[in-house]
Amino acid sequence: MRKTLYIIGLSIFVFSCTSQKNVKKSTYKPRSPVSQTKTGVGSQNLVKNKADVETEHGVEFFRTNIADITKNDNTASYGSIVSAKPAGYKVVKTHFPAIAQNFRQKYLILHYTVLPDDKSIEVLTQQSVSAHYLVNNLGDNEIYQLVDENKRSYHAGISAWRTDKNLNDTSIGIEIVNLGYKADAAGLKVFEPFSDEQVKKVAALAKDIVIRYNIPATNVLAHSDIAPTRKQDPGPLFPWKKLYDEYQIGMWYDEMAKQNFMSLAEADIATRYNEPSFIFVVQTALQKFGYDILPNGKWDDATKKTVEALQYHFRPQIYNGIVDAETWAILQALNQKYPTK
Ligand SMILES: [Zn+2]
């Protein structure tokens, strides 16, 4: 049904654009409410064919409200509907919802707080950082909402993914209470695990959000993915694979594809690991996948941190920032499965 509506909507849009110059401005207006009682707007009888379109002065008009919010996801509003209240005028929002609209919420970003429960609430509500949701570690069934989904919360900071920047503008942020990591004697970051209750809460919340806003798998990300040189959260112990396998949330590579890339990846690592041309190819693959990195043919600190971010998310067993054969194979498998459009 949505496809039908879109096709009709598109053809009308194209038609009206091309024919607009032949129409006197005064005649170019929708005639919506007239036929409401006849065709039953709000019922199941939506526009299905040409009979539902009428022509006036060479311009086609829908006889019914084609953007019925019960049938068209693009026009459904899941938050509060905020309208102007201009003095002396009435804002009409029932008859003319446009099909050319989408949600501003394009990303879902996961974090950990590096603070215990009480401090997490205090900082995220009283200071200059915030998130839309906070998942506590108290084993109860509550999830705290700190910011309206239609408003910006300050959780991402300087950030980028693929062609987008400053993701606070277009994302929903979830903070998870967790103490982060401590460096061991050898300098390796040792992360604190998440409780099963927290993972279940995050999964249920994330599922609800990605479905409502139609957020693509490629836009469900860690803070470390969108700010790899600054951030590590939610770290390698956050179970991204479990979310993918059990809840169909976010990205994961296909094991078979990874295996297909492995032998070539092993050869690359063994024979040309330090060649600038190979480093450039790896950096370009990281950039293509979505990371904000400028290929320069050097294993520099920014590249190491970006590789570490990739490992936190997709190869959490070893997260040393060094491109080994498996990391390289996984990156290629991800790019094959989730190509940039
Ligand atoms: Zn964060």
Image: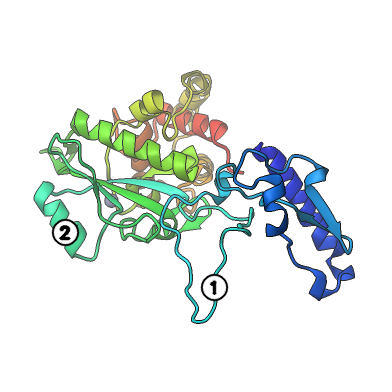
Query: Where residue 115 sits in the image (x, y, percent)?
Result: 13, 49
Q: Position of residue 146 (x, y in %)?
A: 25, 55
Residue 60, quarter of picture: bottom right
Q: Kindly identify the amino acid type of the residue bearing the numbered disc 1.
A: Lys
Q: Mark 2 highlights which residue?
A: 123
220 versus 19 height, above or below: above
In this view, which residue lies farthest toward the front? 37
Disc nearer the start of the sequence (2/1): 1
Q: Is residue 47 left or right of residue 232?
A: right
Residue 46, quarter of picture:
top right
Is 53 placed left or right of 146 in the picture? right
Ligand 1 within 8 A of label 1's CB?
Answer: no
Q: Amino acid at mark 2?
A: Val
Q: Position of residue 52 (x, y in %)?
A: 78, 46
Q: CA distance from mark 2 to mark 1?
A: 42 Å
Give the side of residue 38 with respect to residue 27, left or right: left
Secondary element at image label 1: loop
Q: Please tell me which residue is depicted at 56% across the width and 48% down the height of the picture.
A: 69
Mark 1, other Cα within 10 Å: few <14 / some 14–19 / many ≥20? few
Q: Secondary structure at mark 2?
A: helix
In this rendering, position of residue 52 left or right of residue 136: right
